[in-house]
Amino acid sequence: MRALTTTVDGFALNGEPFRIISGAMHYFRIHPDQWADRLHKARLMGLNTVETYIPWNLHQPTPDAIDLDGLLDLPRYLRLAKEEGLHVLLRPGPYICAEWDGGGLPAWLTDDPGIRLRSSDPRFTKVFDRYLDLLLPALLPHLAAAGGPVIAVQVENEYGAYGDDTAYLQYVEQALRTRGVGELLFTCDQTHQNHLAAGSLPGVLATGTFGSNVARNLERLRTHRSSGPLMCAEFWIGWFDHWGEPHHVRDAADAAADLDALLAAGASVNIYMFHGGTNFGFTNGANHDHAYTPIVTSYDYDAPLSESGDPGPKYHAFREVIARHAPVPDEPVPAPGPKLPATVVDLDRRTPLLTNAGVPAAPVRTTEPPTLDALGVRAGLALYRTTLPVAGEGVLHFAEGVGDRARVYIDGSPVGVLERERHEESLPVHVPHPGATLEVLVENMGRVNYGPRIGDPKGLLGPVSFNGTILHEWDTHPLALNDLGPLTFGPADDTPPGTPSFHHGTFDVDTPADTFLSLSGWTKGQAWINGFNLGRYWNRGPQRTLYVPAPTLRTGTNELVLLELDATTRPQAWLVDTPDLGVAQS
């Protein structure tokens, strides 16, 4: 018997009427040592369920490996949810969107231009089958049928906005069923009738995604399915940010009124997001409509629970709304967590990136510049080197552009920047002498997570020429930056200002607590605390601070490393007690 079933107008859990009041929180965006805290706060707000995507690209970094450790220990997350008394909605994709790098599809898969993604193409279904064969044995003990917390599993994700291959959706359904997933299955789509028609399956619950206009959207769902539960599987109560745009917020009272309307109509809900978390490392996605726009490191989403796990205005407003429709625990609302005292960090040691590129990775010699994808680099940067055959004034042309931001140097001196976001492909330069060294440092700013451009390559995307002459014989250093241990730091005075460099500093902590890294005066780069990659910073904004989870700190001496790609006005950083996500736009 399935634990969760549908009735003529709702759900039943083990035969008793049940309404799903869920909130999204992605385990892979939260430090594992904070999972229990976030789950506890979810229950105290009145949620009876939590929802999470499963990112294929992180769990299967290579075709024959599955990773379920640390940040990816999903079985542990599910155990903690059960211990807290929460049910779970699982969304394994294969595609998840989620403003996540590549929409969760592995780069080793999207590298192959011959595979038709998210389709019944046997080449695609074969690799997804392999993934499920590796993943599901560890998850089956946590399904409701085995006494676990997982009561429902999603089939694909907003497929109606992408395609109409019904045979493919049927394949995903059967791929789950034949591997032991007997729980309720559901699809979710935007409530446009064409999307619902293309993205749903007979016998599978169809749900909608929306953030307002509750009555209209529920009516569209009812038009699509004349009976059964009404559910908003993504009730958007905030939004995400792109670099260079304002910070998005939504008024708590406005969001609470729409939540009240949903619950008053008898619908079930999954609040997206209850707790957004952080795009640690190089995991942020990007959009590409008319231009490429990468997503910032914070995934705060203006959610009820802030990026650092503190209840905000929506937490209190939503708790009051839920209490009008369902039981809410008679326990106090959690107070904001402790924060580290303000701390100044002097970054007084340094090592240049360009001259040390061979330390993280040896060069690959090719005739033409390879893409990062051809080098097997999922994320990070690459340094390309060749020589310029003639001297004089001229134009460097990068056929097909760059993916996604390139800093160009001649004999170690910066000569310009090219951005995919601005559709830039050419750069006027002066070559001081024949044989001058050309270096191009290319940064992958995040893979597109929505639409037809998923799988776009990174790095140098075509031939590079100077005044029409194509340049050959390239040495390329892949810089995945997974391990900074081999780096050796020296006095900062030994490195010329403005050179892309790793900066190192230490600071002392009496009692670890959450904090926020403020980088006023720094330009663009990546930050690590004790080897933990906090993510990307950029003075373009809106985000001005990076969240530092308390578990990344230790009592005593701690290390901060910044990879500054441009320049800084002073070699200092600050740990502060308040986040700065930018000027808000509602």
Image (cartoon, helix red, strand yellow):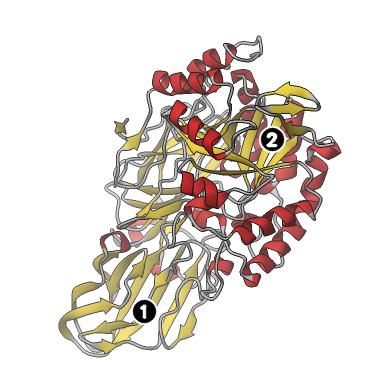
Label 1 element class = loop
| Amino acid of disc 1 | Gly
Locate residue 10, reporting x and y percent. 66, 27
For disc 1, the neighbor class at 10 Å (few under 14, some 14 to 19, many from 20) is some
| Amino acid of disc 2 | Val
Residue lying at 47% horizontally and 54% vertically, measured from the top left: 449
Count of marks overlaid on the render: 2
Instruction: Identify the image quadrant of the C terminus.
Output: top left
Instruction: Identify the image quadrant of the N terminus.
Output: top right
Residue lying at 30% horizontally and 59% vertically, measured from the top left: 421
Task: Classify 340 as above or below 104.
Answer: above
* Residue to which mark 1 is pinned: 462
Residue 82, located in which quarter of the rendered image? top right
Q: Residue furthest left?
A: 393
Q: Distance between the residues labelled 2 and 1?
A: 45 Å
* Residue to which mark 2 is pinned: 88
